């Protein structure tokens, strides 16, 4: 099984991405013992054609990224715009959104955000009872457009105000054991 891990963090003076990097490395370390794992760190630059080849050869793609302003960093959005090319990821179809070429591939989001967990799934809180997957629905739809199948999302909440790195790492391992390891 081949796994492609993408580090979508975009560095800013106030946000160095240490947690994101730690989780990215944990994913690679956990999965590389039994699988071929390739990766890209967007902040380091990339070649579009090589990235497309990584997608083509991967069975599972994992995005490790922070959530900035209710979406992914601009760097990851630009990556998607450049890499997800017509004829590689999708083709035309008379049934809109059903021309995806990656029907044998799975994807997963591993997210970090400063929003507290209680702000989700509770009608009286900020997100009005919506889940993290509701928040990233456009990301799920773009992968559905490419015919990819989702693996449940992993999220770390309250990462600036109340970080608990060991808890995040333990929960990530449990998530990978539950959702990724059975696939490989």
Image (tube, rainbow, N blue to C red):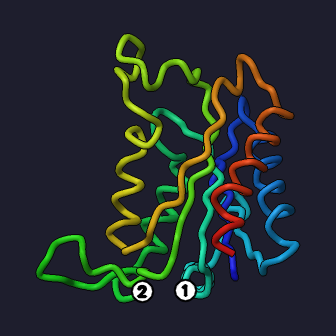
Q: Quadrant of residue 67?
A: top right
Q: Which mark is residue 158?
A: none
Specify whether 166 is left or right of 93: right
Dot placed on the residue nearer the N-terminal end, 1 or 2: 1
Q: Residue at x 41, y 38 (%)?
A: 135
Specify whether 142 is left or right of 69: left
Q: Is residue 167 above or below residue 122?
A: below
Q: Position of residue 29 (x, y in %)?
A: 86, 62
Q: Quadrant of residue 122?
A: top left
Q: Is residue 114 above or below residue 177?
A: above
The residue that disc 1 covers is 56
Q: Residue at x 83, y 54 (%)?
A: 26
Specify whether 118 is left or right of 136: right
Please state, as top left, top right, bottom left or bottom right, where the C terminus lies in the image: bottom right
Gap in angstroms between the C-alphas marked 1 and 2: 8 Å
Please state, as top left, top right, bottom left or bottom right, where the N terminus lies in the image: bottom right
Q: Is residue 19 above or below residue 180?
A: above
Q: Secondary structure at mark 2?
A: loop
Q: Are marks 1 and 2 in contact (CB under 8 Å)?
A: yes
The residue that disc 2 covers is 88
Q: Which one is in front, 122 or 55?
A: 122
Q: Residue at x 37, y 74 (%)?
A: 147
Q: Secondary structure at mark 1?
A: helix
Q: Disc count in the image?
A: 2
Q: Position of residue 99 (x, y in %)?
A: 27, 81
């Amino acid at each position: 099984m081949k796994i492609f891990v993408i580090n979508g963090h975009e560095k800013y003076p106030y946000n160095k991405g240490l947690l994101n990097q730690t989780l990215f490395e944990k994913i690679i370390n956990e999965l590389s013992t039994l699988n071929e794992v390739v990766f890209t760190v967007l902040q380091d630059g990339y070649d579009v054609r090589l990235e497309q080849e990584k997608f083509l050869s991967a069975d599972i793609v994992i995005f490790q990224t922070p959530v900035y302003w209710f979406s992914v960093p601009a760097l990851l959005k630009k990556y998607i715009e450049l890499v997800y090319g017509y004829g590689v990821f999708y083709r035309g179809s008379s049934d809109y959104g059903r021309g995806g070429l990656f029907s044998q591939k799975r994807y997963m989001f591993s997210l970090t955000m400063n929003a507290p967990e209680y702000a989700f799934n509770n009608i009286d809180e900020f997100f009005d009872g919506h889940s993290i997957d509701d928040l990233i629905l456009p990301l799920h739809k773009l992968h559905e457009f490419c015919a990819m199948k989702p693996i449940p999302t992993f999220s770390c909440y309250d990462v600036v105000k109340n970080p608990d790195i060991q808890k995040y790492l333990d929960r990530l391992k449990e998530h990978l054991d539950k959702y990724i390891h059975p696939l490989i």
